[in-house]
């Protein structure tokens, strides 16, 4: 038997167990569903819930994922491994959200038994599949035996002592050199000290390390967004995607690949075109400082 439990996230960050019913998944609630059978924690965001309420629900879900729910001397959801977010506004528009929602609907369609403290149980074996006959593996064909060939005596070669020769091969040029790969050999002559009246050339700017460069670019994106939205929420998901949201929904999502920021296809889809252009212009302008 597997166990599951449903919570309603109230104001102030309190998660309250409630009766098992899919009718609780409404637009004015944030609901957490703990499912031991799939080792998953589903987090339902109602379409009418604001950014603050959503983040409060996310913190509660992450706490349950890490510690489970204690009932007496038992812990329900001790081995939960995945947190799956379902935003009601994205149903029918986002493949990942649709997949998680379908999984949740399958869970609600199972035959359950109500236990104490709002816990329900269900059978993990709803369908039994026919046993699959093992496929016999073909026996490997024996390799033909090779006749042994007598080894020929290896001639002994006397090596000559290594001679130290002055190298005339120039050092390899780095990415900062402007000289050609073939450098002529110039005989050294005694140096004549001369007083130079020229000012020393300024050193070239130091190239930033890759991780610093990436962090700067992420900051440039956020600066451009903050020029238009006072309240934003930034989160980094397990798959490495950075998500930026404002009070009315998502702004953009992006990943870091080969030192570059790559936005997802549906980024900036819910904001005005001129705002998107201004954010892009700000990012390009700040990137020139690197």
Image: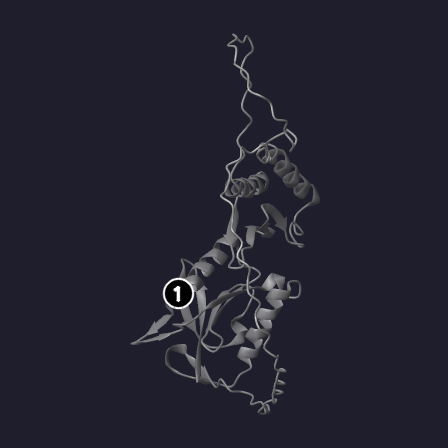
| Dot 1: element | helix
Asked which colour scheme the image uses, the reply is one colour
On the image, the x and y values in percent for residue 185 come to 61, 26
Q: Which residue is mark 1?
A: 66
Q: Residue at x 51, y 43 (%)?
A: 211
Does residue 17 appear in the picture of this structure?
yes
The residue positioned farthest toward the left in the image shown: 73
Q: Is 6 located above or below residue 2 in the figure?
A: above
Residue at 40% over, 83% down: 115
* Quarter of the image where the N terminus is located: bottom left
Q: Residue at x 49, y 75 (%)?
A: 38
Q: Residue furthest right?
A: 273
Snapshot quadrant of residue 66: bottom left
Question: For the image shown, how many numbered marks are present on the structure?
Answer: 1
Q: Is residue 273 above or below residue 288?
A: below
In the depicted view, which residue is nearer to us: 260 or 195?
A: 195
The location of residue 233, given as percent across then percent down, is 51, 50
Regarding residue 229, the answer to whether it shows in the image is: no
Mark 1 neighbour class, 10 Å CA radius: few under 14, some 14 to 19, many 20 or more: few
Please tell me in which quadrant of the rendered image residue 196 appears. Answer: top right
Residue at 60%, 31% in the rendered image = 177
Considering the image in quadrants, where does the C terminus appear? top right
Counting from the top left corner in percent of width and height, residue 128 is at 56, 90
- In the depicted view, which residue is nearer to us: 284 or 228? 284
Residue 27 spot, x, y in % from top left: 56, 64
In this rendering, position of residue 83 left or right of residue 254: left
Of residues 272 and 210, the one drawn nearer to the viewer in this rendering = 210
> Residue 26 versus residue 243: which sits nearer the camera?
243
């Amino acid at each position: 038997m597997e166990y599951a439990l449903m919570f309603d996230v109230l104001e102030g960050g309190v998660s309250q167990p409630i009766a098992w019913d899919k009718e609780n998944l409404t637009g004015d609630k944030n609901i957490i569903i703990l499912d031991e059978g799939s080792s998953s924690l589903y987090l339902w965001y109602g379409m009418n819930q604001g950014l603050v309420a959503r983040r409060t629900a996310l913190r509660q879900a992450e706490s349950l994922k890490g510690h489970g729910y204690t009932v007496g001397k038992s812990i329900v959801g001790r081995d939960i491994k995945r947190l799956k977010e379902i935003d009601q506004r994205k149903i029918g528009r986002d493949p990942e959200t649709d997949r998680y929602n379908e999984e949740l609907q399958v869970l609600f369609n199972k035959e359950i038994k109500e236990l104490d403290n709002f816990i329900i149980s269900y059978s993990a074996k709803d369908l039994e599949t026919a046993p699959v006959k093992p496929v016999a593996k073909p026996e490997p064909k024996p390799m033909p035996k090779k006749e042994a060939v007598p080894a020929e005596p290896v001639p002994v070669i006397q090596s000559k002592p290594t001679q130290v020769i002055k190298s005339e091969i120039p050092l390899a040029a780095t990415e900062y050199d402007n000289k050609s790969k073939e450098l002529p050999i110039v005989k050294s002559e005694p140096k004549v000290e001369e007083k130079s009246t020229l000012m020393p050339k300024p050193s070239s700017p130091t190239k930033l390390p890759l991780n610093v460069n990436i962090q700067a670019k992420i900051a440039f994106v956020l600066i451009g967004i903050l020029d238009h939205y006072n309240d934003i929420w930034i989160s980094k998901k397990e798959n490495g995607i950075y998500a930026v949201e404002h009070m009315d929904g998502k702004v953009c999502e992006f990943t870091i690949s080969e030192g570059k920021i790559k936005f997802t296809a549906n980024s900036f889809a819910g904001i005005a075109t001129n705002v998107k252009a201004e954010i892009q212009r700000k990012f390009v302008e700040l990137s020139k400082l690197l």
